[in-house]
């Protein structure tokens, strides 16, 4: 029933820019998160809405980047992009002359920045804290590149840029999680110098199991025995 | 060479208070973190200093609790404590009449709040973010109770209070990590309703492996190809 998607082919030089996201990127972020949930076989956990993304990622005033929840967007441009000191995190030229790239979703992911740019991925990160180091770090909640743009060094560019920013801010470490069956990702991360910690497991209290603790803290309920 | 520690015995009723920490708690927090590192067999990773803890946990101005790095202190008092709405997170009476409790470190851990209180534990938590929920949550970096005060329900009180506060703030989940060999902790957390996620592994980039990414982001270095 749906019209065939109009694929756009990129060839020759294209320019990748990792930049701070703004509220105008929320529709793309929302669909990228859904694609990520599909990839991770976790669509049953997907409950994101554009409204919630806007209010939680872009509150007014929005805190400085890397001091709270921080969304970054990966845009690809068919022409050179002048870095904007207020938003560009990293940029590089990509040479596609040897292997042109067809992006069937290029129109749907047209970047709000215009100029023929397409949005190809995103990062969500926020500060975490190590008591052993008594220093902040960065936790990368998500790093995602749409399928046609993978295996071009863009994931490496994104994670390197986040790690670089953390190092420059004097942070103690960068952490993220990987599914133990995702061998490609594990190899990639280890190749970048990361340790995959075998012993730690994540514990999670959510949904109804969390709700039942309402009243366990604060105010009169907490003061009562 | 050291003088024998002067043990204090607590009996009858004592009052537990989980409260927001302040900079005056940093010396105790520092020693509690070291005790935790000993317990986790991870003293090789311990690099905390009082100076760093003060500057990172209690910057000026300190953000509101649960909006950034948040330290909570567990104090035990030999007399009833009137909850302070500005700092008390949870409180309860503990009946030790059936089994008095000897605390060999009571003098060393005298609470800066006075009144014969002793500091028996701490929590460090901070907001994290779930893209799937598009909501903030709370991540509990540490939850620790000194040895003589364990198995009295205080860990449950502390985690329940943090979960309660997260639920009341409309957060989507509370998460923390556990070592896979710590069966007591895993049983305890599962008993509280938490899921221990089997598939996720933590990736960590730190130290020299992190430093080598300096220059990968931002400014001229990032703009260069």
Image (cartoon, coloured by chain):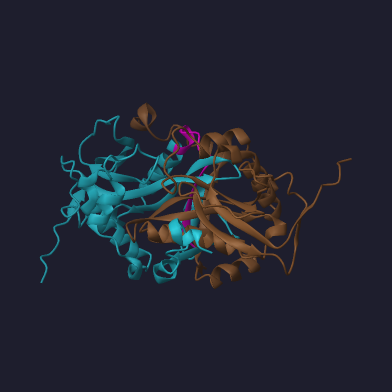
Chain colours: A brown, B cyan
Q: Which quadrant holds the C terminus of chain A?
A: top left
- What residue sits 18% from the left and 44% below the top? B112
- What residue sits 38% from the left and 61% below the top? A172
Q: Position of residue B39 (x, y in %)?
A: 35, 64
- Taking the image as shown, residue B2 lies to the left or right of residue A89, namely left
Magenta highlight range: B166-179
Judge by depth and name the residue closer to the eye, A90 or B183. Answer: A90
Judge by depth and name the residue closer to the eye, B222 or B181. Answer: B222
- Taking the image as shown, residue B64 lies to the left or right of residue A155, namely left
Q: Is residue A174 above or below residue A34?
A: below
Q: Is residue B91 above or below residue A177?
A: above
- Taking the image as shown, residue A141 lies to the left or right of residue A106, namely left
Q: Is residue B131 visible?
A: yes
Q: In the figure, residue B160 lies in which quadrant?
A: top left
Judge by depth and name the residue closer to the eye, B6 or A162. Answer: A162
Q: Position of residue B53 (x, y in %)?
A: 27, 53
Q: Which quadrant holds the N terminus of chain A?
A: top right
**Residue A151 lies in the magenta-colored region:** no
């Amino acid at each position: 029933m749906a019209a065939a998607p109009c694929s756009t082919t990129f060839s020759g030089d294209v320019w990748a820019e990792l930049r701070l996201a703004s509220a105008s990127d929320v529709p793309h972020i929302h669909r990228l998160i859904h694609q990520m949930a599909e990839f991770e076989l976790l669509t049953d956990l997907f409950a994101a809405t554009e409204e919630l993304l806007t209010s939680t990622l872009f509150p007014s005033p929005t805190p400085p980047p890397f001091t709270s929840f921080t969304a970054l967007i990966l845009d690809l441009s068919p022409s050179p992009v002048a870095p904007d000191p207020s938003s560009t995190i990293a940029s590089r030229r990509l040479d596609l002359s040897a292997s042109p790239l067809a992006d069937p979703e290029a129109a749907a992911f047209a970047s709000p920045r215009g100029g023929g740019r397409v949005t190809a991925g995103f990062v969500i990160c926020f500060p975490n804290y190590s008591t052993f180091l008594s220093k902040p770090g960065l936790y990368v909640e998500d790093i995602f590149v749409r399928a046609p743009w993978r295996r071009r060094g863009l994931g490496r560019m994104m994670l390197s840029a986040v790690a670089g920013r953390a190092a420059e801010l004097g942070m103690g470490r960068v952490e993220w999680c990987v599914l133990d069956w995702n061998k490609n990702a594990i190899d990639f991360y280890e190749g970048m110098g990361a340790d995959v910690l075998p012993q730690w497991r994540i514990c999670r209290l959510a949904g109804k199991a969390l709700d039942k603790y309402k009243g366990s803290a604060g105010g009169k309920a907490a003061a009562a025995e």
